[in-house]
Image: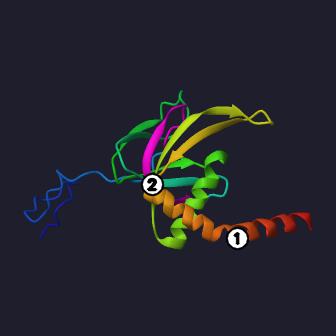
Amino acid sequence: MATPKNTGNPAPNPEIIDTSTWEKEQVSFDPYFVIKENARFVATFVGRDDEAKNFVRYQFLAMEHMKCQRGPNDAESDRREIVDVKPGETFNISSFVALAKLLDQYLNYSDDTGKAVPIEVVCTGSTKTEAGNDCWLWSARVPPKVKAELNAWRKEHAPRRLQAGAAARAALEA
């Protein structure tokens, strides 16, 4: 009996599930939010990705439709892909000095309480640092109930943060 040749086309199978109406999932790195003046997003903070120490990112779940991108963050690049991020899908932003402290607080709050933080973030402009580097400026808003919970958590944890800060300063001075 001859062995049939594999033509690369599978034989029709009536038990194959029709996936033609299924929705695509994000594969690869999360798309990133493109920073420019007046750019905004509303999302739930998920966490910090610092696996690559020289490239820290903060991750979010979108709460509304938004445009992000994949590929080089270079306006001239033809390898850049604009991605439509839907509510519930993940995206990230790079770690920006003026925003990182707040997001790290949210990370500690979420770790301590198990509660996520919904946030609106707006890039309000940029300024020059003393060293002459550009620094993005931000505004952030959270729902009133979340703000009250965050403030109570901050008040409870302020002594611990102050002690950690004093210990870090002492270690630097030693």
Secondary structure at numbered mark 1: helix
| Residue neighbourhood size for the residue with mark 2, other residues' Cα within 10 Å, grouped as few (<14), some (14–19), many (≥20) | few
**Residue sitting at x 29%, y 51%:** 24
Q: Quadrant of residue 163?
A: bottom right
Look at the image and tell me in which quarter the N terminus lies. Answer: bottom left
* Three-letter residue code for mark 1: Pro
**Residue sitting at x 17%, y 51%:** 20
Please tell me the numbered disc located at residue 104. Answer: none
Q: Is residue 40 above or below residue 106?
A: above
**Residue sitting at x 53%, y 29%:** 75
Residue 6 point in image, percent of width and height: 21, 59
- The magenta region covers 33-50
**Residue 77 shown in magenta:** no
Is residue 72 visible from the viewing direction of this image? Answer: no
Look at the image and tell me in which quarter the C terminus lies. Answer: bottom right
**Colour mode?**
rainbow
Residue at mark 1: 159
Could you give the CA–CA distance between mark 1 and mark 2, rounded to whole angstroms? 24 Å
Residue at mark 2: 144
The number of numbered badges drawn on the structure is: 2
